[in-house]
Image: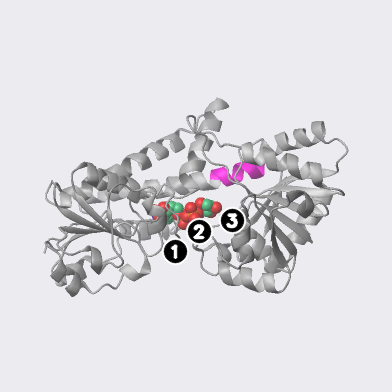
Amino acid sequence: MRVVMIGSGYVGLVSGACLADFGHRVICVDKSPDKIDALERGEVPIFEPGLEQIIAQNTTAGRLGFSLDLPRAVADADVVFIAVGTPSRRGDGHADLSYVYAAAREIAAAVTGFTVVVTKSTVPVGTGDEIERIFRDEFPEKDIVVVSNPEFLREGAAITDFKRPDRIVIGTDDERAIDIMREVYRPLYLNEAPLYFCERRTSELIKYAANAFLAMKITFINEIADLCEQLGADVQKVAKGIGMDKRIGDKFLHAGPGYGGSCFPKDTLALVKTAQDHNSPLRLIETTVAINDNRKRAMGRKVIAACGGAVRGKKVALLGLTFKPNTDDMRDAPSITIVQALLDAGADVHVFDPEGMEAAKSVLGPVTYGDSPYAIVDGAEAVVVVTEWEEFRALDFRELKARMAKPVIVDLRNIYKPEEMVKYGFSHFPIGKRITKA
Ligand code: UDX
C-alpha cells in the first residue's frame, strides 16, 4: 500500500511510522520546512518513547519518507490520511476545521486514480460529509471515497496503542474503501485486533463519545476522592473495589488534579458545543467540563491549605509539570493553573520536570526552573507532586527532608504510601485519603 500522512504532528508521525513498520510505503507530509528538515536528519520533534527508533529503522529500510510536496506525495497514493490539527476555535470552543478542509482540497486537486481519503484527526460529526461535498462539487472528475478512522492513541504509550489496539474503528460503507482499509490494517487483525466497521457519522461520534466517557470517569473518581477526604475513606480502595466489577472496570479511576492534555479538554468542549447546536445537550459532559476546570484551581488551594493557609513569600517546589508522565506535552496541563494559583497567592514557585520544562517556559508565569528534584527543594515549605513521573517514586526522602524548610508533601497523584512518608518524617497530603501529619 502507498500511504500518505498529511500532518506530521503527534498523530501523523506515530501512525505513519507504525504503518511503515507494518511494511507499507509511507510518506509523511508537513507544511513546516523546519520540521521536515529535522525529520530527514533523523531528529524527531516530539518526545514519545520508541518513536525515534521506529522512524530510524523504517527510514533506513526505505519505507518511510518525509516531504513538503503534498501534490507529489499524494498523486499516486492508495490511502491519504488527514492528521492535521483541529484546535479549539477561539471564542466558541468548536473544533477549528480550516486545516482539515484546506488539506482535503489540496489532496483532491492532486490525486490521479481511485484514492481513499481518511480523517484521522478528531473531527466533529458530519465533517466527512462536508469533505465529500467539497470533493463532489469542486472536483467532480476525481474518484475519491472519504472514510473516518479515529485514533485512540495515548501519549507516552502511542506505539503500543497503535500496534495493540483494543479496536480499530472504520467509518465507511463503500466496498472498495473497506477492502483498502482491511489491507492497511491487515497486520493488526492478524494480531486479532478487531476491525469495527460502521457508518462514517457513527465512527466520528465514537471518538468523541469515548473521550467524553473517559473524561467523565476520571471526573467521577475525582469527586468521590473529595468525598473520601470528608468521610475519612480511601479513594484508591474505593476505586479498586468498584473496578473489580467488570461492568465498571478498573481503568481510568486514578484520582488526581484533573485531566489535561491535547484531547480530553478540547474534545469534551467540542462535543458539548455540537450537542447544544443539535438541541440535544449532553449535561453530564457539560458538568464534567465545569468540574474539571474548577478542580485545577482547587488543587492550588489544597497546596495553600497544606502550607498552613498562606504561601506569601514561601517557597513551594513542584515535581512534574506535563499533563501526564512520559511526554513533554504541556497542553492544558493542570500544573499551569496550579502554578498560577500559587503565584497569585504570593508563593515563590520552583519547578522541575524531566521532559516538559522547555514547553513549560512559554506557558508558566514567573517560576524558577531547577535541573533535579533536589535542586528545587532547598528551603521549600512544601513539595507538590503534580505529575507521576516514575523517577519521583523513589526519591531520597532523607535528603529531601534535610533540604526543606518544612517536611510537607502534597501528593496530587497518590504515588507515596502515607505510612512511609510518616516514617521519613513528612506530613503527607494525598488525594482522597486521610492526611497524615508528621
Ligand atoms: C487520551 C485518550 O486516552 C486517547 O484514547 C485519545 O486518543 C487521546 O486522549 P492522552 O490525552 O494521551 O489520551 O492521555 P490519557 O492517558 O488518556 O490521560 C489524559 C488525562 O487524564 C491526563 O491528564 C491524565 O493524568 C488524566 N488521568 C487519566 C487521570 O487523572 N486519571 C486516570 O485514571 C487516567
Frontmost residue, 194 versus 165: 165
Q: Is residue 148 left or right of residue 308?
A: right
Q: Which quarter shows the N terminus?
A: bottom right
Confirm or deny contact between disc 3 and disc 1 (CB under 8 A). Answer: no
Cβ atoms at labels 2 and 1 below 8 Å apart: yes
Label 2, label 1: how far apart the Cα atoms are: 8 Å
Q: Is residue 214 above or below residue 397?
A: above
**Residue that mark 1 sits on:** 326
Q: Which residues are magenta?
A: 201-209
- Using residue 330 as the reference point, say whether residue 120 is left or right of it: right
Give the mark toward the camera: 3 or 1: 3
Pointer 2: what residue?
Answer: 155
Q: Ligand 1 near label 2 (Cβ, under 8 Å)? A: yes
Question: Can residue 375 be seen in the rendering of this structure?
Answer: yes
* Coloring basis for residues: one colour
**Mark 3 neighbour density, 10 Å: few (under 14) some (14–19) many (20 or more):** few
According to the picture, the residue beneath numbered tag 3 turns out to be: 34
Q: Is residue 247 visible?
A: no
Q: Name the dominant secondary structure of the magenta segment.
A: helix
- Residue 399 appears at what percent x and percent y? 18, 73
Q: Secondary structure at mark 1?
A: loop
| Figure quadrant of the C terminus | bottom left
Q: Residues within 10 Å of mark 2 (few under 14, many from 20)?
A: many
- Determine which quarter of the picture holds residue 183: bottom right
Q: How many numbered markers are drawn?
A: 3
